[in-house]
């Protein structure tokens, strides 16, 4: 009979415990990166709203207060079985200005603060509340 080299149960469990400890140490450092990556969704969608509002203003000489009117369909949020982490709304619109907001529907780092972004007629998304 020939003996086969293999790992025993204790060795595998020790390796899994070490990996778990390393993950617990690294996870708090990765949370800001996860939040930053998820916030790019809000920036991209708000830029799309800005472009749609600008096009609407060129056509009708005013900004719109209706997302449907500017052909913006907000993606389904994770609360609605979608993939979006933000809900979108138009706060104000006039002939010369508009303001749109993206509010996070989930708390990315579990601290109770939800991320909020806004954009206006100048076209630069601004982070109002950092998660």
Image (cartoon, rainbow, N blue to C red):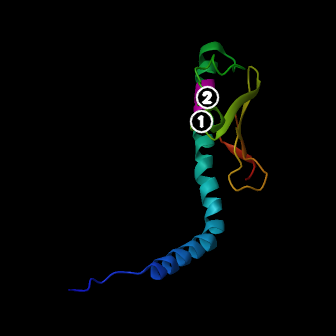
Q: Which residue is mark 1?
A: 45
The magenta region covers 47-53
At 62% across and 71% down in the image, what residue appears?
24
Q: Quadrant of residue 33?
A: bottom right
Can residue 122 be seen at all in this image of the molecule?
A: no
Residue 97 placed where, x, y %?
A: 74, 27
Residue beneath the point at 49% across and 78% down? 15
Depth check: give the residue in front, 56 or 18.
18
Select label 1 or label 2 by which is in front: 2
Residue 118 is tagged as none
Residue extending farthest to the front is 1
**Which mark is drawn over residue 74?**
2
Q: Secondary structure at mark 1?
A: helix
Q: Position of residue 108 (x, y in %)?
A: 68, 52
Would you call the spot at circle 1 few (<14 residues within 10 Å), some (14-19), or many (20 or more)? some
Vertical side of 42 occupied by 4: above or below? below
Asked whether 120 or 10 is in front, the reply is 10
Q: Residue at x 38, y 81 (%)?
A: 7
Give the main secondary structure, helix, strand or loop, of the magenta stretch: helix
| Left or right for 127, reference 80 | right
Q: How crowded is the residue under tag 2: few (<14 C-alpha within 10 Å), some, or many (20+)?
A: some
Q: Quadrant of residue 76?
A: top right
Give coordinates of residue 32: x percent, y percent: 65, 60
Tell me: residue 43, above or below residue 27: above
| Frontmost residue, 113 versus 41 | 113
């Amino acid at each position: 009979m020939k003996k086969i080299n293999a790992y025993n149960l204790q060795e595998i469990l020790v390796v899994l415990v070490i990996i778990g400890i390393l993950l617990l140490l690294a996870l708090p450092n990765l949370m800001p990166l996860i939040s930053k990556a998820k916030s790019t969704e809000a920036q991209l969608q708000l830029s799309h709203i800005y472009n749609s509002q600008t096009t609407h203003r060129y056509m009708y000489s005013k900004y719109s207060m209706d997302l449907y009117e500017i052909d913006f369909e907000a993606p389904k949020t994770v609360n609605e079985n979608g993939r979006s982490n933000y809900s979108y709304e138009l706060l104000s619109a006039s002939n010369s200005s508009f303001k749109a907001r993206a509010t996070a529907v989930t708390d990315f780092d579990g601290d109770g603060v939800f991320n909020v972004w806004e954009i206006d007629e100048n076209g630069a998304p601004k982070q109002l509340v950092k998660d």
